[in-house]
Amino acid sequence: MCGIVGYIGGKRAIDFLLDGLTKLEYRGYDSAGVAVNCGDNIFVEKAVGRLDSLKQKLKNNLPLGNIGIGHTRWATHGRPSDTNAHPHSDCHGKFFVVHNGIIENYLKLKQDLTAKGHKFISDTDTEVVAHLLEESYHGDFLLAVRDVISKIEGSYSLVFMSKENPDVLICAKQDNPLVVGIGENENFVASDIPAIISYTRKTYILNDGEIAIVQKDSVQFVNRQGLPINKKIFNVTWNAAAAEKGGYEHFMLKEIHEQPKAVRNTISPHIKNNSIHFDELNWNADFLKNIDKIYIVACGTAYHAGLVGKFYIEKLVRKLVEVDLASEFRYRAPIVDENTLVIVVSQSGETSDTLAALKESKRLGAKTLAVTNVVGSSIAREAEFVIHTAAGPEIAVASTKAYTTQLILMFMLALYMAQISKTVSDSDAERLIEQLKKIPAQISETLSDVEPIKTFAQIYGFNDDVFYIGRSLDYCVALEGALKLKEISYIHAEAYAAGELKHGTLALIVEGVPVIALATQKSVYEKTLSNIKEVKARDAIVIGIAAEGDTSLSNYLDHVIFVPETDELLIPLLAVVPLQLLAYYAAITRGCDVDKPRNLAKSVTVE
Ligand code: F6R
């Protein structure tokens, strides 16, 4: 959730640093800072708050140096402040460092360094790294960095700059992303590709334990022991426009409208001759026979996608699936062994809890499969098997296209497993694939008339509480709809399994309370309808979400939003769309910062 940038070359470093940090704003942060080596001095500026505050401070005082580092910080150790903002330095201003992650043994290191006379000015774990470097440095910058790395425990991506070594940046990575972008007589460093794609497409993606020595015309890699590593260049295929708003007012709206394409791109590599293929898995019947338990582990929206994935696998493959929040799973001694398949779902592929759950599952001997949107991400590299959603970069903090692509990928995964284990008939598989192929066009159809949703959002935008109800897969979608509304509009929203209402929550349903009722699941339709009548009888304002062709719901409700008809397993991909739009327009009505909601960050790389 913090952002790192670095530049070395022939141009003014500050221009890339500020631009790169701007491109990483979506990651969430509460302060920012830069350090630029100007030869006789190191120029440092920091500011709490948005990047604009830093730019304001720099306005008439832009440093001219050609090597520099920058950072956007999201507070973990120590409150957001100018002093706690990165870059951090040692006692004598010789070394500067920016850091993403957490140094777990920083307190012990700080005590030792303080005893040796080092003076600390911030509350951060990162400052320890700069002082350690000062302690380890005896004329060889790389040797000193390697010594620091051997002493710190925890997760990090680190970029070091040294006053005495003005021709090099040194970077190190463990459990946090870091890339080096290759330019002409200049090189770039960043925690994420969007920071550098408008400068270069040629990158090196660092692996854990790797150290990069970045000079203006060369990049070399060594491991912790100092042995050279040969790395392949990774060519980024995203175009710069894909990471920009493309005419929409917000990234979130753009990404909602990108869903037909994102879902189509996710589907197309896996359908051949009317059956589902995952060449990257290549599983067979024996492999599946040996799996007696499946966990799906994830956080937030990805967890909600996992809940839908459970339905898919249980229904089509007839294997028991448990869905767990990654932050719970890793600490509750899960029953996992070599006959367990653990599926982790993560858009970013960097979520700390999900990564830790994956590592724990591997340690316990499980087979692991990652469902992720980011090729080369930590989770993708850690898992035994990886399948990718093709959502493209998701910039808005609130996840939308990542969710729908996760659903479709898990649907195809379940169908793939069902084909192998012969738990689905050929004719059913064919019918489902036919329905699957229609989904992108049906999402477009769902997106074609947003006006009624805008109107509802204007009504709901001023309510303090909204309830979402549904049964079966509708309940899973209700959870996601409520999360969307909460996170971007700050309206209190709760989702309930409709059958649970009378066990407590019905007490909150009184005249005028808004309820969004999902009734797309044919198998439980009558049951849902009776729950809808229960809330309607208490004079709640109810908006229904139903499949086209449903002629009953309108008899009971004033407002019904219809989505195209499809198999009930696939309808969550359509039913979620009006809920995303409702959340978006409610947030707009309330004047909220849609793409950067308060207290939230796009990629949660700390626990
Ligand atoms: C909500 C949202 C978050 C993420 C969660 C997991 O809109 O985006 O709840 O889904 O932080 O992130 P990933 O999928 O990157 O692991």
Image (spheres, grey):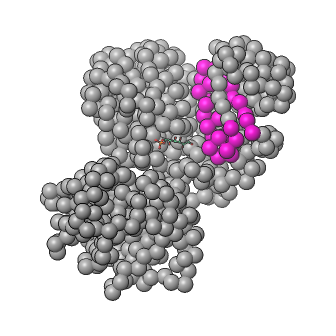
How far across and down, in percent of the image, does residue 283 sit?
32, 26
Residue lying at 69% horizontally and 29% vertically, measured from the top left: 468
Q: Residue at x 44, y 22 (%)?
A: 322
- Which of the pair 390/226 is nearer the observer? 226
Quadrant (top left/top right/bottom left/bottom right) for the C terminus: top left
Q: Which quadrant of the structure image shows residue 233?
A: bottom left
Most extreme residue toward the bottom is 40
Residue shown at 42% from the left, 76% from the top: 44
The residue sitting at 33% across, 85% down in the picture is 39
Can residue 498 be seen from the camera position used here?
Answer: yes
Find the magenta span and give its range.
Answer: 464-492
Height in image: 58 above or below 98? below
The stretch drawn in magenta includes residue 488: yes
Q: Is residue 592 above or below residue 469?
A: below
- Residue 549, percent from left and from top: 76, 22
Is 117 on the left-hand or right-hand side of 328? left
